[in-house]
Image (cartoon, rainbow, N blue to C red):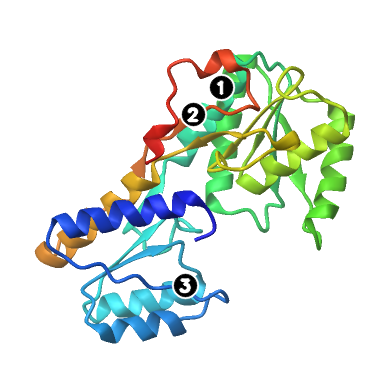
Amino acid sequence: MWAPYELALLSGAQNTLTRRGYFAVLGAKSPTGGTEYLDEIVPSGIGGLIYRRPLRKEVRRLEELAQEGIPSIAVFPRNKGDLYPYIIDMDNVKAGELAAEVLIRAGSVRPMYVVNDPTYALHPDIDRVAGFTRVVQKELGFTPIKCELPQVETDIDKLEFLTKFIKEHRPDGVMGAEAGSSYLAGIAAEKNNIDIPREMSLIGFDCYFFPSERGHRMSAVATSWWRAGQAAAEGILDIVNNNTKWTEPMKLDPVFVPGDTTPPEIAEGSSFYWVF
């Protein structure tokens, strides 16, 4: 539970289960990605599992449990194939498209995206970059500036690389493909004396509670984690009670959550409170 929207996910699931007459059992994930915590909760008599971003060993164990009659749904998985098709995720291609549209609306003519080294980038990041690139090519007629962060030991090393990259390329709009890269981009802009959002707009993902440079709240593209929890609870009950078979994942629409890192005029009509 490292961010407030994790609590929104839990609330959405628990509220839905309670209204349907079920009792929600809360279990913790192993910090190492092992299955020991999972194996401890299984004998309690649970009927199904809603699992937030399972790791590799957890995926294998959840697949085994499904064969034993305990189904699972993965919420915001790391990989597209994790428990496929029993997945609830944001439509990440559409999210990348929305990020590009927001930056272009903010006046960006030199947009850039920041993504981790392809060897380590997760599927949401790759899909967001694809959507972002598609809109920039369509609307501006060229490919956006690409900044691939090297796989280095610390975020300090990444920040040093990103600071030099921004100084060299001088983008006027930046999308961080995940929360960490957008946060680092804000600090890198500050180090280059770039005024956000007057000289450079900045947008990330699921980072609307994060402070950016100078403590400003980050603008973000996100989806409702409360709705994800609700959908997961409804889905697992349908599977348990009706033996429903999914044929494809459920994709949730993204929305723009305005913060301080994009011009205030493009926030018109946007509401922060949909998150809950």
Label 3: few (<14), some (14–19) or many (≥20) C-alpha neighbours in 10 Å: some
Numbered disc 2: secondary structure: strand
Q: Which residue is depicted at the point 36% across and 74% down?
A: 62
Q: Please, is residue 73 above or below residue 268 in the view?
A: below
| Residue 204, numbered label | none
The answer to which of 146 and 184 lies nearer the viewer is 184
Q: Mark 2 = which residue?
A: 256
| Residue 29, numbered label | 3
Residue type at numbered disc 3: Lys
Where's the C terminus, which quadrant?
Answer: top left
The answer to which of 250 and 205 lies nearer the viewer is 205
Q: Which residue is depicted at the point 48% across and 41% down?
A: 92
The answer to which of 166 and 219 lies nearer the viewer is 219
Residue type at numbered disc 2: Phe
Q: Position of residue 7 (x, y in %)?
A: 42, 54
- Contact, mark 2 vs mark 1 (Cβ under 8 Å): yes
Give the quadrant of residue 190.
Answer: top right
Q: Position of residue 239 (x, y in %)?
A: 18, 63
Q: Mark 1 = which residue?
A: 102
For marks 2 and 1, give the CA distance: 8 Å
